[in-house]
Amino acid sequence: MKRHLTVIGIAVIAGLAFALYNLKYQVHGLEARRDALTQAIAAEYESVRLLKAEWSFLNNPKRLADLAKRHLDLVPLDASRIVSLDDFPRVSRQPSGESSAEPATRDAKTSGTGTKWLVGAHTVPSP
């Protein structure tokens, strides 16, 4: 009987030793994977840091103003380009020759006075 217990005990110890050996190499593999991921994360942080620095350089107001001067040909707005609504022609609600059921401009909106302001392709109600 003692002999059977000794054989079973040795088999259990050998099984546990094999499991511990296998677990040790799994842990080594996981540590290597963790180290690789840590290095990849550090590289990504470095990339983000470089991209933020490049974004700051590209959005520098002095640089953007220089690029706008060179490429956009913009000029400041002068007072002669500002007009009031009175400078635009008025269009009556019912021009002569049309029936009373249809307005002169179908997409124009009218004010309470029955007049329309036409500005380019858009209409603005009169004040």
Image (spheres, rainbow, N blue to C red):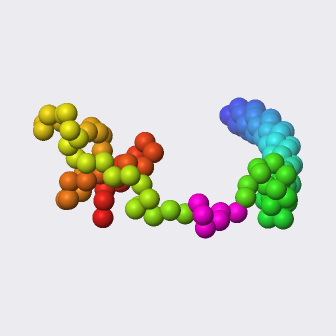
Left/right of residue 3 with respect to residue 98 in the rendered view = right
Q: Position of residue 25 (x, y in %)?
A: 84, 39
The magenta stretch spans residue 79: yes
- Rendering quarter of residue 14: top right
The residue shown at (25%, 48%) is 92
Where residue 76 sits in the image (x, y, percent)?
A: 70, 63
Q: Is residue 99 above or below residue 36?
A: above
Left or right of 2, for residue 42: right
Nearest to the observer: residue 112 or residue 80: 80
Q: Is residue 82 left or right of residue 124?
A: right
Return the residue found at the far bottom: 79
The residue that appears at 19% across and 59% down in the rendered structure is: 112
Q: Which of 39/75 is in front?
A: 75
Viewer-nearest residue: 88 or 112: 88
Q: In this picture, is 91 found above or below 16?
A: below
Tell me if residue 28 can be seen: no
The residue stretch that appears in magenta: 76-81
**Horizontal and vertical percent position of residue 121:** 43, 42
Task: Please say whether residue 81 is visible from this viewpoint.
Answer: yes
Residue at (20% x, 59% y) in the render? 113
Label count reads: 0
Name the image quarter holding the C terminus: bottom left
Q: Which residue is situated farthest in the left direction here?
A: 100
Residue toward you, 58 or 37: 58
Q: Position of residue 15 (x, y in %)?
A: 75, 34
